[in-house]
């Protein structure tokens, strides 16, 4: 059985590049639980809160019940559900899953394959991460689902299911933004080499985002993580009349859902609301509208805060 192929072809709702990471998140969660307890089951009523938190944190801004992937992942042949009545899911309704004592776990054939070939677990996890999430979130996501991956387990994903990244993108994007964070202006270097600066995809590479300058931002490590988590985004136009126009008039969005009580959170996050982007330099292409719109609808959480006074 080609388990990597099955994982790469999970049937997901799709329209105009919309994210639907519900099944991949449940699959990753199940792999993490299998790693700790290969014989255990995931009773829906016991894991509903965990799955809900994963969807809130790593899913799109519109909320979806964890009951949806718990039921529908069965159709992909990697997951099974049993109830008090026997094998088979009662449906995607929360009440039915709770009332019937529904419990899920990886399909028997997949569990057997993982026991025969333990390294398969790492390859499956890496494939799911690469196909559905940006690299900046991989470590946090593994921690959230309880996965412990060794480098040797994760480096064998077939090229046939992976797009190849352009290694020149980082240099092109950092050059376009003159080696400074487009949100805060950080421009640190060590021995003449930039340190703590990264090329962020606006439309994620995993969702057909190209390795082009107009799909990139030079961001410091902190703001890259916050941008990929949907705390920060990019809006149209200057926040106030007379605000200097930069980056094709784009301004920084800060989610109203973000909570930061300390001085550092206010200074490095909430105070950014409404500020113009720094860069790119004249002649370099600013972020394309199509990529900015994708990030706003698929990654940015909630509504933006008013511009900081």
Image: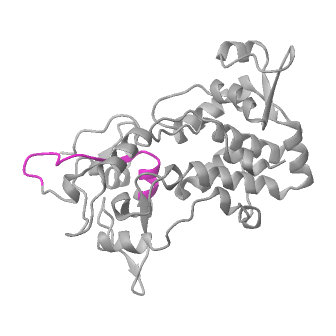
Q: On the picture, is 274 further left or further right than 69?
A: left
Is residue 53 covered in magenta?
Answer: no
Q: Residue at x 45, y 74 (%)?
A: 168
Residue 27, given in percent of the width and then of the height, sits at: 71, 40
Q: Residue at x 39, y 44 (%)?
A: 294
Residue 147 vertical position relative to residue 79 in the rendered view, above or below: below
Q: Residue at x 34, y 51 (%)?
A: 269
Q: Is residue 135 visible?
A: yes
Task: Decide which of 68, 241 is in the foreground and name it.
Answer: 68
Residue 152 vertical position relative to residue 125 in the rendered view, above or below: below
Residue 24, given in percent of the width and then of the height, sits at: 65, 41
Task: Decide which of 261, 232 is in the foreground and name it.
Answer: 232
Quarter residue 196 falls in? bottom left
Quarter residue 39 falls in? top right
Q: Is residue 233 visible?
A: no
Quarter residue 73 falls in? top right
Is residue 234 covered in magenta?
Answer: yes
Task: Decide which of 221, 88 is in the foreground and name it.
Answer: 88
Outermost residue toward the front in this view: 160
Residue 30, given in percent of the width and then of the height, sits at: 75, 40
Q: Total marks drawn?
A: 0
Q: Specify the quadrant that holds the C terminus.
A: top left
Residue 223 vertical position relative to residue 84 in the rendered view, above or below: below
Task: Decide which of 256, 59 is in the foreground and name it.
Answer: 59
Residue 268, given in percent of the width and then of the height, sits at: 34, 55
The region drawn magenta spans 224-243
Q: Residue at x 73, y 30 (%)?
A: 75
């Amino acid at each position: 059985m080609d388990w990597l192929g099955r994982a790469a072809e999970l049937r997901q709702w799709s329209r105009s590049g919309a994210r639907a990471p519900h099944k991949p998140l449940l699959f990753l969660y199940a792999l993490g639980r299998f790693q700790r307890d290969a014989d255990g089951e995931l009773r829906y009523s016991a894991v509903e809160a965990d799955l809900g938190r994963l969807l809130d944190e790593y899913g799109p801004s519109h909320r979806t019940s964890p009951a949806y992937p718990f039921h529908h992942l069965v159709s992909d042949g990697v997951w099974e559900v049993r109830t008090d009545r026997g094998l088979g899911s009662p449906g995607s309704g929360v009440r039915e899953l709770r009332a019937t004592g529904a419990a899920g776990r990886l399909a028997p054939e997949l569990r057997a394959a993982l026991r025969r070939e333990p390294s398969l677990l790492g390859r499956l996890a890496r494939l799911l991460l690469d196909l559905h999430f940006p690299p900046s979130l991989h470590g946090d996501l593994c921690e959230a689902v309880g996965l412990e991956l060794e480098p040797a387990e994760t480096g064998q994903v077939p090229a046939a299911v992976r797009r190849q990244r352009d290694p020149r993108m980082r240099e092109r994007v950092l050059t376009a933004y003159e080696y400074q964070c487009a949100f805060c202006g950080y421009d640190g270097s060590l021995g003449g080499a930039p340190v703590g600066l990264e090329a962020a995809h606006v439309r994620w590479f995993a969702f057909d985002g190209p390795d082009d300058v107009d799909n990139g931002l030079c961001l410091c490590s902190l703001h890259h993580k916050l941008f990929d988590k949907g705390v920060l985004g990019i809006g149209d136009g200057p926040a106030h009349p007379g605000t200097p126009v930069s980056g094709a008039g784009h301004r920084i969005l800060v989610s109203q859902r973000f909570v930061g009580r300390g001085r550092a959170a206010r200074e490095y996050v909430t105070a950014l609301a409404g500020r113009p982007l720094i860069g790119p330099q004249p002649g370099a292409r600013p972020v394309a509208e199509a990529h900015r719109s994708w990030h706003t609808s698929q990654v940015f959480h909630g509504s933006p805060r008013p511009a900081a006074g």
